[in-house]
Amino acid sequence: MSGATDRLWLDALTDILARSHLFQPGELAEAVDAAVAPLGIRTTIHLVDEEQRTLRTVPQEGRPASEPIPLDVTLPGRVFCLVQTLPLSDGAGWWVPMVDGTDRLGVVEFAFPGGVDTDDEVTRQRCETMAGLIGHLITVAAPKGDFLFQVRRARPMSNSAELLTQMLPPLTSSCARLTISAILEPRYDVGGDGYDYAVDGPLARMTVFDAVGHGLRAGLALTVAMIAIRAARRAGHGLYDQARAADAALLEQFDDARFVTAVLTELNLDTGMLRYINAGHPAPLLLRGARLVRELPAGHRMPLGLDDPGVQVGEEMLEPGDRLLLYSDGVTEARDAHGEMFGTERLINHAERHAASALPAPETLRRLAHAVTAHHDGPAVDDATLLLAEWSPRAVRRTLP
Amino acid sequence: MNAGTGQTWQSSTTVSEGTAVVALFGELDITGAARLREILHNAIDQHSRVEVELGQVRFVDSTVLSTFVNAHRHATAAHVGFTVSNPVGHVRRVLTMTRILPMLEGRDTR
């Protein structure tokens, strides 16, 4: 690559960054496209829909509207799922995964109408850097307006799902030693299920929740439990006190025995010591290699909100490479047309199979969640949540472009 | 005998010597929670002991568990005994998993 071309890339990056302060969400795609035009590149940004089934193109002035691109059978879908750059089918450019950190947002299409050598690694890496910048900018620009939320949605969201959208941390987050990924269904109508995590220094704190009932009432109970735990955590309190803070907050807000089941965990990445409390929730699954080691049996207490002071925090020593899978009962109790539940055994089978195929953690969960949805038959869907933590640098690398 | 309404479940209440036995049948979820609450609270308000017979219940969701806990609180405040008995299958599993069963069976010594 010549110095002149390098200079054009620098100009493009500088131009986008300089203009980003004032971007409206709807201006971003065109600004990026204009900034890379001197390089002979046309960019198109595709965002994954909320249910992670299709890529939806961010509209640009003067471009024809396009249909959603299914993830399961297409080249750009494969790029998204595996977080891996691939050449366009005509060989004149690349599909590049777009992440914020390691949270999968979509893919960016870099087309070189004048042709490009797709073996040119430097140019490919430049495109990946640009896609990374676009991912950050989308995350920053999105809350300024509704446009990018609307692009990602195939239909309107319920009030409770809208609330959750504001409450939850990104679906996927990695640090050098750990990948955490989560998924929620039904994404447009989720009520009382949720997850939270925080990784600081050696401590990874991960929680999944399931509040009684459906709709916004369940979403409010979930919110009360989640923010009480967050506040206690940020005040430096441990697992036991976090759970007691949620008890107190729920009892203060609700007088109808409205409870929230949850698993609160704290993994020490230096030692592998996992400490956990299981407040009336399905037991976490521990996978080693591609095999289930055990369902973690300790740390039991009644659900959050039922004021249970008598709990012993469970402890389990993890080995490097271990996977921890937290889930809500909406996963295992999803029933098919004959009333048969998805069941813990089927969940374990799927988890073991995906562990063997070495997919990125968010892709493992996407496929697991869709298997549950496919099993389910009928309208009254219970919320289903999955959270997968992989304590492995190799698993972390799989989440990087 | 009072027949409860609802497509997926029924109830019947029998009384002897001050104890009301509320027998439930079928699958109970959020759609029946309000009706169940009314049945249980009525029984608690009228009798000195209430026993909920669960042997014929095949499914309960978390709103039903919450309704049981709420009835237990209501009964305790009114000094009325309130217990559930004979949960089987899925119902026993969720009551056990949530650690609510000892309280509802009157075995909770805390």
Image: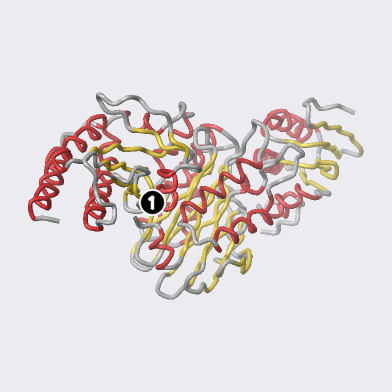
Determine whether the residue tagged by mark 1 lies in a helix, strand or loop.
helix
The quadrant where residue B52 appears: top right
Q: Is residue A279 left or right of residue B47?
A: left
Q: Amino acid at mark 1?
A: Ala
Identify the residue shown where x is 55% and y is 69%: A289
Quadrant showing the N terminus of chain A? bottom left
Identify the residue shown where x is 90% and y is 28%: B1
Identify the residue shown where x is 80% and y is 32%: B9
Q: Is residue A26 left or right of residue A215?
A: left
- Count the labels in the image: 1
Name the one closer to the observer, A285 or A399. Answer: A399
Residue A69 is at least partly visible in this image: yes
Quadrant showing the C terminus of chain A? bottom left
Residue B58: image x %, image y %?
Answer: 80, 42
Identify the residue shown where x is 51% and y is 67%: A275
Residue A8: image x %, image y %?
Answer: 11, 47
Residue A310 is at least partly visible in this image: no
Subunit of label 1:
A
